[in-house]
Every structure is written in structure tokens, then in C-alpha cells.
Amino acid sequence: MLAFVEVNSKTGASYMFQSALAVAIGGALGSLFRWFLGIRLNGLYPDLPLGTLAANVIAGYSIGVAIAFFARLPQIPPEWRLFVTTGLMGGLSTFSTFSAEVVGDLQQGRFAWAAGEIAIHLSASIIMTLLGFATVGVFSRIALA
């Protein structure tokens, strides 16, 4: 909110509006995709909600690709960066849902399940983010060859 208050010029206000719109649209699309994954996958194995895991793993990989891609192409407008990283990936990743599922397991005394969920979600997301960076590196080398 402070960022909106600090903007005084017409150009700055326009930029803030475009940025907010990019985040909002990206967030809506990411959230819809997360909802879709939950509907399609969570019922397959209720003890480990696969929709939440899929959303976090996909978001982890995608944000790695996005950050590496944007770093190589700094001319891409910042609104696109916000749309993808803050909006789309922020809407898709489900840390609060993941946290609620782990707390539910803990409340039910399923401590091993909770520990397993924590290990799987965190390690898979970090590995996929690293893989996203590596993917852009490989494609960049291929494009330059």
C-alpha cells in the first residue's frame, strides 16, 4: 500500500496500475490452475494431497525457469516479470495450503506423515527450482550454438 502512496507522477501511477493488474491477473490464473490440480489429484491419495504437491512442484520449476529466463532477457518489461513470478507462481504455489495440511496431520497425531509431507514438498520444490534454472541454461547454450 505504501508503494501506491509514494507514487505522485502520472507515469508512476500508470506503472503502479499496470503492475497491480499484472499481479492480479497472474494471481487469478495461478489460483485457478491450483484449484484445478486439487480437484483432479487430491482425491487420488487423500493421505498425501497430490494436487498441492503438484502445484508446489510445478511452481518451483516454473519460477526457476522464469527467473533464469528474465535474467537473460532484461529488456522484458517488469510487468511481465510481476505477472509470472508474483502473480502466476504466487497464485499457483500453495504454502498456506501445505501448512494447513501439515498442521492437520499433526493434530491427528500423524507425525510421520507430517514429516514426510514437509520433506517431500520442500525438497521437491527446491530441486525443481534448480532444474528450472538448469533448463534455461541448457536452452541458452543450444540457442547460442
Image: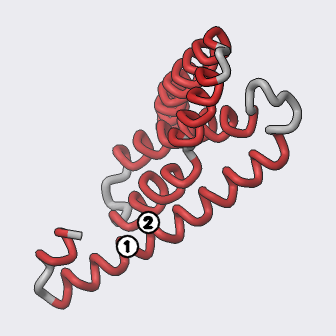
Q: Which residue is disc 2 drawn over?
A: 23
Considering every residue shown, the one lying at the far right of the view is 44
Contact (Cβ within 8 Å) of mark 1 with mark 2: yes
x 75%, y 46%: residue: 37
Q: Is residue 126 left or right of residue 104?
A: left
Which quadrant holds residue 31? bottom right
x 80%, y 38%: residue: 42
x 52%, y 50%: residue: 89
Q: Amino acid at mark 2?
A: Val
- Vertical side of 110 occupied by 104: above or below: below
Question: Is residue 121 or residue 23 the one in the foreground?
Answer: 121
Question: Is residue 74 or residue 4 the one in the foreground?
Answer: 4
Colour basis:
secondary structure
Residue 142 seen in render: no
x 33%, y 80%: residue: 17
The quadrant in which the N terminus is found is bottom left
In the rendered image, residue 95, in percent from the top left (x then y), is placed at 51, 39
Q: Which residue is disc 1 drawn over?
A: 20
In the rendered image, residue 6, in percent from the top left (x then y), is placed at 11, 75
Question: Is residue 117 or residue 126 the one in the foreground?
Answer: 117
Report crowding for label 1: few under 14, some 14 to 19, many 20 or more residues within 10 A (C-alpha): some
Q: Is residue 136 left or right of residue 17?
A: right
Residue 52 seen in render: yes
